[in-house]
Amino acid sequence: MKAVFFDFVGTLITKEGENVTHQNIVREVLKRAGRDDLDYLMLWEEYEAESSAMFKELAGRPYVKIRDVDTEAMKKVAGRYGFTVPDDFWGISLEMHARYGELFPDAVETIKALKDLGLHVGIITDSDNDYIEAHLKALGIYDLFDSITTSEDAGFYKPHERPFRLALERAGVEAGEALYVGDNPVKDCVGAKKVGMFSVLLDPNAAKRELWGDCDFVVSRLSEVVEIVKGLMEK
């Protein structure tokens, strides 16, 4: 075992924090549009539904900018209520992600423990480059990673093989020497195993039990990854 890679949203940062971030994006958009009369939580739910549906269609497909997808999702909601999305919508999004993003409590200690074992620690994420760089720097963990591979770099979204293979190339390791940790059984576990990497599913509440069979390991806390890695290193 020579390398461990992590997904980002839902794996290193909490989905709860991401929800708060998106709620504040919608609040700021409504403020800029002078539409404080609208219920931002209701519009946030509509925005999430639009965005999720669009991203589901992109799984495994060629990369398109996430900023364009998110902007289009917001414009669809805005069109229903008769207001205009600000031209700097992506800037608002980056600012709110930097302000409200929330790491899992054991994320930093887990990353540092893996690095102490002499491992390459990286990220493989469906993300625009400016988003992931700004967010990691705001969280104060950008410099902890040896490599960051995005769908923008790879030209495809997970579970396509290319993001995983590109990350392995950058780390200079073979697939069988690497482990990938994510929160999506289909995109993360299936994608990693397709290229020969070990896969770990982070499922804190056992909500995805019916899909555990797609993954090599299942954990409820990130810190458990360290023991899994140690066990693989001993083999």
Image: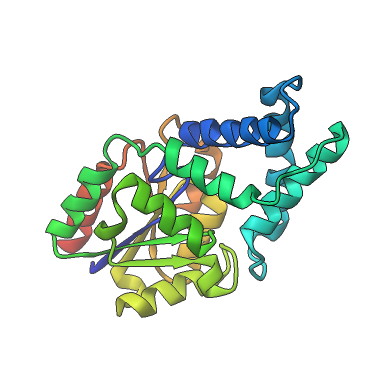
Quadrant housing residue 172: bottom left
**Residue positioned 42% across, 70% down in the render:** 196
| Nearest to the observer: residue 142 or residue 96 | 96
Question: Is residue 56 at all visible to an observer of this figure?
Answer: no
Horizontal arrangement in the rendering, residue 10 relative to residue 92 (left or right): left
Q: Is residue 52 left or right of residue 145?
A: right
Examine the rendered structure and indicate whether residue 174 appears above or below residue 186.
below
Which quadrant of the view contains residue 159?
A: bottom right
Above/below status of 23 relative to 165: above
| Rendered-image quadrant of the N terminus | bottom left
Residue drawn at x 31%, y 42% is 222
Relative height, residue 129 to residue 110 (above, below): below
Instruction: Report which quarter residue 52 is drawn in.
Output: top right
Identity of the residue drawn at 78% across and 45% down: 75
Is residue 225 something one can see in this rendering? Answer: yes
Q: Position of residue 94 (x, y in %)?
A: 52, 48
Position of the C terminus, as image quadrant, is: bottom left
Where is residue 229 drawn, in percent x and y?
23, 56
Q: Tell me the residue at 29%/48% (across/down).
A: 140
Relative placement, left or right, of 235 versus 189 is left
Q: Position of residue 169 (x, y in %)?
A: 38, 80
Judging from the image, the colouring scheme is rainbow
Image x and y of residue 211, in percent: 54, 44
Question: How many labels were placed on the picture?
Answer: 0
